[in-house]
Image (spheres, rainbow, N blue to C red):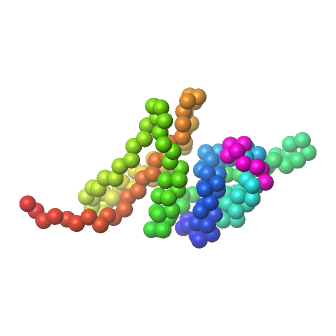
Amino acid sequence: MDVTPRQYKALGHPQRHRMLTALRRRPATIAQLAAALGSPKGTVGYHVKVLVDAGLVRQSESRTVRGGTERYFEATPGALVHDQHGAEFLLRAALAEMVPPSGDEVEHTMLRHVWLTPARARALVERIEAWGHEPAQEEEAADASAYGVLLSVFRADIPRLPPA
């Protein structure tokens, strides 16, 4: 789906961006999100409502627990297709998530330019999309950490030198 202004606004708050990232892993309740984020349930409930209203999160199920209703929320399925402003948003979001490596943690960022035909560029995008839609697998090790991978295929403004 195309990203709407309401969705950009909803994702503009770092707390909501973190919630959506967590909900892409699995459905969770307000209480579970509050515990994971270290925030009050009321605050988390408000932010979840904003994400629901923007169409980025939906209720996935509900259960009756001790006389109350426990509602689970999940990220709305489907990839977000970003225009140029969306790419800028994703870059800012990735920068906001980055934490300096400590100990033996790995970090690597690079920008590489390649010359591709339109057909090869489409094939590369298809490979990246297929990899990005594979189910996430959590590492069972207690010392496992979350890592972000930001991939982008874009036309670059690089001049072509004449043959030598």
Q: Tell me which residue sits at (68%, 43%) in the image.
A: 36
Q: Nearer the viewer, residue 148 or 37?
A: 37
**Is most of the magenta stretch helix, strand or loop?**
helix
* 36 inside magenta stretch: yes
List x then y, in percent, for residue 108.
Answer: 39, 43
Q: Nearer the viewer, residue 76 or 53?
A: 53
Against 60, residue 83 (above or below) is below
Q: Is residue 75 visible?
A: no
Q: Nearer the viewer, residue 85 or 43?
A: 43
Q: Is residue 35 left or right of residue 104?
A: right
* 132 inside magenta stretch: no
Q: Is residue 133 left or right of residue 115?
A: right
Q: Tell me which residue sits at (86%, 42%) in the image.
A: 65
List x then y, in percent, for residue 162.
Answer: 12, 65
Instruction: Tell me the quarter of the picture where residue 16 sits.
Output: bottom right
The residue stretch that appears in magenta: 35-42
Total tally of numbered discs in the picture: 0
Q: Is residue 97 left or right of residue 125?
A: right
List x then y, in percent, for residue 66.
Answer: 90, 41
Q: Tell me which residue sits at (76%, 49%) in the image.
A: 40
Q: Is residue 48 left or right of residue 104?
A: right
